[in-house]
Amino acid sequence: MKKLILGTAGHIDHGKTSLVQALTGIDTDRLKEEKERGITIDLGFAEFSPKPGFEFGVVDVPGHEGFIRNMVAGATGMDLVLLVIASDESVMPQTREHLDILQILGVSNLIVAMTKADLVDREWRELVAGDIEEFLEERSFYDVPIIPVSVKTGLGLAEIMSQLMLQAEDIEQRSIDDLVRMPIDRVFSIKGTGTVATGTLWSGCLRQGSEIVLQPSETRARIRGLEVHGEKSKEVVAGQRVALAVSGTSVSTEDVQRGQVVIDSPNWKTSFILTSKLQITKRSPWNVRHGQRLRVHLGTDEVMARAILLESDEIRPGGSGWIQLRLEQPLLARVKDRLVVRSYSPVTTIGGAIVGEVCASKRKKVGESERSVFESIIGGSREQVFESVVGLAGWKGIQKTEFPIKTGFSPKACDEVLERALTKGFKETSVSIFGVDVINQAKSKIRNEVGDFHKINPLSVGMSIEAIRNKVPVDDGGKLTDVLIDEMVRANQLKVSDGLVYRTNHSPVLSADQELVVNELLDFYEAAKLEVPEVASLPVQFTKREDLWSILKYLEHRGDLVALNKELFVKTSLLEDVLTQVRGEFEGQKDLSPSDFKISIPVSRKYLIPILSYCDRRGVTVREKGARSVP
C-alpha cells in the first residue's frame, strides 16, 4: 500500500479544516480554543483511503500569521498539498507565505481548492482562478489544477478526490530501508499508557519494542506501543502518521517535546554548524547580512542562528549564496535537508536553505573549488555527491557509518556507490573511506619517507611500520597506512620484513671502516659468550661510535646477533647451542624452575631469565604458571 502525507496550506478562514472534514469526515480542530475562536491554532490530523492501495495521512495547518511556526512544523514532510484559496477573497498574505514555504521545502505536488465557490458567481470565480494561476506561475508552479469547491453543496469534492489519486500515482513512496527519522509534533500523556509522541515518519521503519533515541536531547527510550490514526500496529513505515508510546528511565511529557526527533541509529550526530546554500525569496523584504541573527526551522524544530556569509557581505532578495549557520542550539540535520529561514524580529519568512555539510568546522570563506564541491553535494549525481563528500573530508576521511548522514542517501545506496568508487581508486579501511587525492598523496608520502630513511640510515634494513604510520597525517590508528603498505608490497614497490619497510632495491651497505668494526664486534661477542655486557658497557672503541646502534641492528637483521632485550645482544650461534642443549637435557620434563636450567645454561640470573624468554619465543620451552616445560 502506498502511504503518503497530504497537507493543507492557505490563509486563515479560507476553509482548510472544513474541506478536510468534507473529504475525511474528521474535524481536525481538537483544541477548546480552536472551537471557541473558529480557527486552527495548532496542527490537526486525519486519515482517509480514497481507494484501495492508497492511504493518506492528512496534516491540517493553521493559516493565521501568528501560527506560521506551527504551519512550518506541519508542512515539513508533506508529499502532496491542497492549497486552499477562498473564492470570495482570492490570494491573501498567508497564501503567499505558505506557498513560499512549500516551495522552500521542495513540495512540488499541488492542487488548488478554490473554496466557498457557492458564495460567488461563475464570472467572479473565473477572475479569481486567473489571479491564482498568475500567482502560481510567478512562483514557478505551472499547470496546477484549480478546482472550485463548496463543502456545503459538494461541488468539486469528487474532482478533488480524482486529482489526489492522479497525482498520488506519480509520487514515489518514501524509503523504508533508510535510517529512521521522525520529527515530533505533539506530546501528551495517557493514563495507563504514559508518554505518547506523534509525528510523520519521514524515513525508515519502527517496530514495537525497538530502542530509540530522542535527539538532540539524547534521551533513550523504548517503544511500548504504536498506533496509526488510532489503530494499533506492530510496525509502521515511512509516510505514515504515527503515535508511539515510549518508556524509559527519563521519559515524560517534560523530557519529550515538539522539535525533538526520533531516531534508531547511534550514528546520528547533532550539528551546531551547518554549511548551507541560502536562497532568499524574490518578494522578501529582507537582505541577509554577515552575522545577522535568524530563525532556522527544520522539521518541527526552530532554533536561532547567526548567518556567516561565505561569498559576500550581503545576500539580497532573489539572490543566493553559501553561508554557515552557527546555531545557538543543536539540530539533527542531514545533507540535502531543506531549512526554512525566517527573520528574528519582526518574524517573517526570508527564504530557505539546503544543507551541504553537517557537523561542519568553522569556515570564513568558500573559494571557487569548494563552491563547486558543495554544489555537487546538493545537486550532483550519486557518484558526484559521494566523491565530493569524501574529497571534502580530506585526510580525515569519512567513517562508513556517517555516509548516510553526510550524503543524504540510504545505507543501501551508500553501499552501492561505495562499491563503484572502490574501482576508481578510493580506499576502504575497516572504519573509513578515503578519496583518490588522499590515497595518491599518502602513497607518495610513504615512498618518500622510506627513501629518506634509507639515505639517513644506510645500514638499516628499513623503517618501522609504526614510524611510517606517524608520518602519514591520518588519525585512524594506522589503518589506512597499513592498507596502503600492503598494496604497495603486492605491487612490488616495497617490501616488509620483521616489521620493517624498505624499498625493493634497497640493501644495507657497509663502508670499509664499518666492515672492520663489524668483524671486531663479532669477535668480541664470540669471546664474551653468554655473559656479555650491555651496549652501554661495551669497550670504548665501540661506544664512542655514533653508528653503533645502526651496526648492531644491522647484525641483528643479518642474523649474526640476537637482541635478548633493548640493551643485551648475544651471538646467534651461541644461543643455537643453548637451544640444542636444553632440548637434549630436559625434553619431556615439566615444572622446571629457572635454577633447573643452570646445568645447560651456566650463567647468572641477570642473563638466565632473558635467555629463557628467548627459549620461550623459539618454542623450545613453554612457560605456564611460573614454571616451564620442554615439549
Image (tube, rainbow, N blue to C red):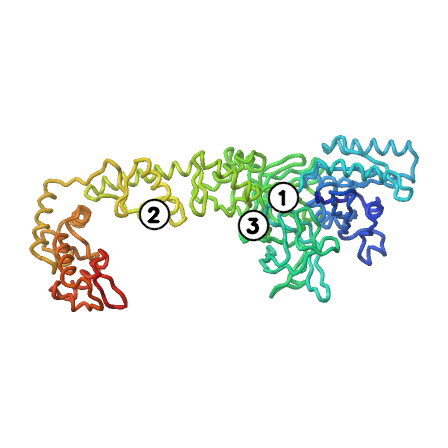
Which quadrant of the view contains residue 580? bottom left
Residue 97, percent from left and from top: 74, 41
Given residues 318 and 331, the one toward you in this image is: 331
Tell me, for residue 470, which label it has, or none: 2
- On the image, the x and y values in percent for residue 280 come to 66, 38
Q: Nearer the viewer, residue 187 or 100?
A: 187
* Mark 2 / mark 1, whichever is N-terminal: 1
Q: x%, y% of residue 253?
A: 68, 62
Q: Is residue 467 left or right of residue 200?
A: left
What residue is at 76 percent from the left and 38 percent from the top? 165
| Secondary-structure class at tag 2 | helix
Q: Where does the C terminus fall, quadrant-wise? A: bottom left
**Residue positioned 62% across, 59% down in the render:** 209
Q: Nearer the viewer, mark 2 or mark 1?
A: 1
Q: Earlier in the sequence, mark 2 or mark 3?
A: 3
| Left or right: 1 in relation to 181 | right
What amino acid type should be assigned to the residue bearing mark 3? Ser
Q: Quadrant of the N terminus?
A: top right
SS at circle 1: loop
Considering the numbered disc 3 on the image, is that residue within a helix, a strand or a loop?
A: strand
The answer to whether the residues at label 2 and label 1 have Cβ atoms under 8 Å apart is no
- Circle 1 Cα neighbour tier, 10 Å, few/some/many (<14 / 14–19 / ≥20): some
Q: Which mark is residue 175?
A: 1
Q: Identify which amino acid the numbered label 2 is placed on.
A: Asn
User: How far is the residue under mark 2 from the one under mark 1?
Assistant: 43 Å
The residue positioned 57% from the left and 48% from the top of the image is 326
**Which residue is disc 3 drawn over?**
271
